[in-house]
Amino acid sequence: MKLADNKATLSFSDGKPSIDLPMYQGTVGPDVIDIRKLYGQTGMFTYDPGFLSTASCQSAITYIDGDKGELLYRGYPIEQLATNCDFMETCHLLLYGNLPDAAGKEDFTKRVTNHTMVNEQMQFFLRGFRRDAHPMAIMTGLVGALSAFYHDSTDINNPQHREISALRLIAKMPTLVAMAYKYSMGQPYMYPKNNLSYAGNFMHMMFATPCEEYVVNPVIERAMDRIFVLHADHEQNASTSTVRLCGSSGTNPFAAIAAGVACLWGPAHGGANEACLNMLEDIQKTGGIAKVGEFMEQVKDKNSGVKLMGFGHRVYKNYDPRAKLMQETCKEVLAALGLENDPLFKLAMALEKIALEDDYFVSRKLYPNVDFYSGIVQRAIGIPVNMFTGVFALARTVGWIAQLNEMISDPEYKIGRPRQLFTGSVKRDVLPISQR
């Protein structure tokens, strides 16, 4: 971050003296106006609901250009990473700032793999949940509970503690997600197999049983790995901001990540791919492709209450770059499983065609986002709809940790404390109960 050559001048129409505010430049993206001294100089705050125009931090991890449809992890385009790198390399990049060489990758993978098992007591913790509990309810509890088992790595201000917590969380999230799934199915938990890849191990823990050998389909393994890469980080979104805000209090990394899991659960955030698949299934039940045109007309009618899920994005005002990659993966998976004629995929393609041609959707820049195709891929793989957000949390964990570590290392970081525009009652006196 460097000081810009020019300043922003804030002037007032009521005759108050104007003030100069410093401006800073990032390496790419819009300049920012530094308002940290605004209250001290004017007695006023800025008002920005949802913080949509506020830079809450400086970060060197992920950059999004929504107008171009560009996503960069540490400067590398997501298209190149998803094509040329696996999830372990992506994790190393996000955590340490560089892509590893072959030896570095092997070392990092070993260090992660060393922590794939969870304490046996976690099984008893699981038994306290109802069998039909939503997996994200279980995940919120399990991730938070990790801090009760790993007392040796809960000091957020200790770099060694943060690193071992990072490795533990990345390694254990697949185990916890798979345990939540197996519990809901009434099947025995499958222990990690450390000779498998990160994605392959997850698939084995999800779908293997003790009674017969399970061999991971390499196409599905690659698809799962790509899902992880595409979801690894996405700048200062709601869950990442939650992790940063929670971590700013000095709480332990496991608690901060559990807060991120809870935030991700919301249907407007991580639950969007679940909502998208439910939408496709509802259209299929009511007539399928024959009803697509009618459905899209209902979407355009504001009074119908019908929403188009999986299209549009808060940041991207162009085609989500992750959606193109996910569409490729979708075709590969369906072909490998003999599901090329999958009705939901055909339905999705028909919806996309209308959205890309109809002026209503084009003018509003409602392009498909990553959720649109990732749900179809996961469903084809055999992951139930209510597990989708758990898989998302698994993938996003490394991004959360990288962002948390960056914040703690930032000399300018402070405990988060947003301000407010108060619109309640002015000061008043409490009357005796007989006079109220």
Image (cartoon, rainbow, N blue to C red):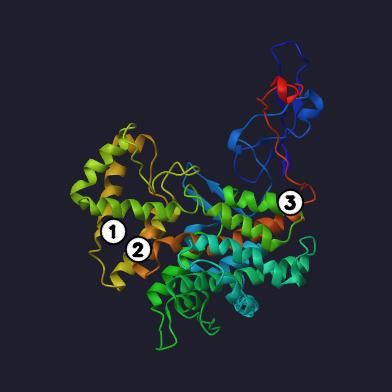
Please name which of the two marks, 3 or 2, marks the residue nearer to the observer: 3
Residue 119: x %, y % from top left: 64, 78
- In the picture, the quarter occupied by the C terminus is top right
Q: Which residue is mark 3?
A: 248
Instruction: State the separation of the CA atoms marked 3 and 2.
Output: 39 Å
Residue 237 can be seen, yes or no: no
Please name which of the two marks, 3 or 1, marks the residue nearer to the observer: 3
Q: Amino acid at mark 2?
A: Cys
Which residue is farthest top?
A: 15
Mark 1 Cα within 10 Å, few/some/many (few <14, many 20+)? many
Q: Quick check: 208 above or below 319?
A: below
- In the picture, the quarter occupied by the N terminus is top right
Q: Dot 1 lies on which element? A: helix
**Of marks 1 and 2, which one's residue comes earlier in the chain?**
2
Instruction: State the separation of the CA atoms marked 1 and 2.
Output: 8 Å
Callout 1–callout 2 Cβ contact below 8 Å? yes
Residue 131 can be seen, yes or no: yes
Q: Which mark is residue 182?
A: none
Residue 343: x %, y % from top left: 24, 60
Q: Which residue is mark 2?
A: 330
182 horizontally vs 345: left or right? right
| Residue drawn at the location 35% of the way across and 44% of the way down | 308
Q: Which mark is residue 345?
A: 1
Q: Dot 2 lies on which element? A: helix
